[in-house]
Image (cartoon, rainbow, N blue to C red):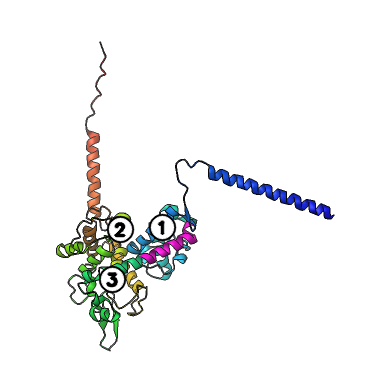
Amino acid sequence: AARDQQQKANDARKELHALKRQLADVTNADDSAPQHGRKRKKMVDGGSEEDTKEIKKLGHKFVMMKMIWLPDLSGTIHTKLDDQYNPLERFENRASKVQGELADLLDLLPQKFHGEIMQSEWLIKTFHEAMQNQRSNTHTRLRSQCGPEIFDCTAIDLFSIESRRDKFRQMIGYVERDDGSARYDRFNVPLLHKNYNGSFDIETVFRGPILHLASLFGGHKCALLTTKALTAMKKTGKPNQATGQTVSHLWALDHCTPGSIGGTAIFARWAVSADTTLTAQGVQTGINWHADLEKYIQYLQNGLDKRKASVLKLFREWDELFFPDSETSLARNNDDEDREDQTTKDVMDMLDADEEEAPAEPQTDE
């Protein structure tokens, strides 16, 4: 019996050895197979190196064009898209907010990243880290690198909690009540307005020149720009042509969005606030920056959806500044587009009605 058991063990080892040899042969054959001129993709923590770079770029773009924060990225991504979701009701409750976030993600991510891969740990981690990096890069640029030029102050003014609070708190919406209490208003904010007159104005809100400067250096056109570019914009009100590659080129941007304008407003307000770090809830100021951003986006998106004249004009002004050749502005005049379509149709009809010329008779050699 012992001899039989030993024989079975030997046979099992031989079978296992044979299977390992077969597996090695298959692996070696795969490694040695011709690649038809294409390099094998390098894998990085679950995704190819190429896909990882793309997801990082999209995470950066999401912060600047959609939302600065996603409170629960993994939870949002694992949520099923509701076919009945209404964008006009996006900010009514947390469930509809999640649907809006999911819609933004699906709109941004190429089709190849939809489905199961979108819920992978690799994609979620890479996207989350990219968002963090973009927030850090932008607030460093706006406060530390370009702050004195943008806000027309000294570096000392922006250096400490106390100096920022003392010099800028009224500019970003700080108001004292009659009962002695104080708070930061989100819409009655001088920094947001052009020629602020003491209260919110739909004709001047989100038109403050500081916002345009902040967008130039932290948003739509940021790149390796110099103070010369800033000086030019202060003089003319328009950015000069960037000589380096800007995020507009890197991210293929061609129009402003509610998220980009609202996000610029948040970045600019935060840059001169007493808060030391850019978090969804300000530690020193107590400002709920994420909630303010949601309200800004809601205001701008509703204005677009309902074709409100003041908001359409606002987007046209921003697009004219940063994307003067854009044909995809969210405030594009539908009547103009309809007229262009009709003109094209008329031209094609005229071409169809033109006489046809008979082909020339073939010549024969005599």
> How far from the left and from the top, in percent, is residue 103?
40, 60
Q: Which residue is rendered at x = 40% and y = 54% of the image?
A: 110
* Nearer-the-camera pick, 221 or 177: 221
Figure quadrant of residue 232: bottom left
> How far from the left and from the top, in percent, is residue 298?
32, 67
Residue 46 part of the magenta-drawn span:
no
Residue corresponding to mark 2: 247
The disc, 3 or 1, on the residue closer to the chain's N-terminal end is 1
> How far from the left and from the top, in percent, is residue 203?
20, 68
Q: Nearer the viewer, mark 2 or mark 3?
A: 3
Q: Which residues are magenta?
A: 117-133
Q: Which element carries disc 3, helix, strand or loop? A: helix
Query: Type of residue at label 2?
Result: Val
Query: Type of residue at label 1?
Result: Ile
- Label 3–label 1 contact, CB within 8 A: no
Residue corresponding to mark 3: 144
Answer left or right for 222 relative to 131. Answer: left
Query: Type of residue at label 3?
Result: Ser
Q: Which element carries disc 1, helix, strand or loop? A: helix
The disc, 2 or 3, on the residue closer to the chain's N-terminal end is 3
Residue corresponding to mark 1: 55
Q: Residue at the far bottom: name it.
A: 179
Q: Nearer the viewer, mark 3 or mark 1?
A: 3
Answer left or right for 18 relative to 179. Answer: right
Q: Which residue is rendered at x = 64% and y = 45% of the image?
A: 22
> How far from the left and from the top, in percent, is residue 27?
58, 47
Q: Residue at the far left: name it.
A: 235
Chief secondary structure of the magenta span?
helix
Quadrant where the image shows the C terminus = top left
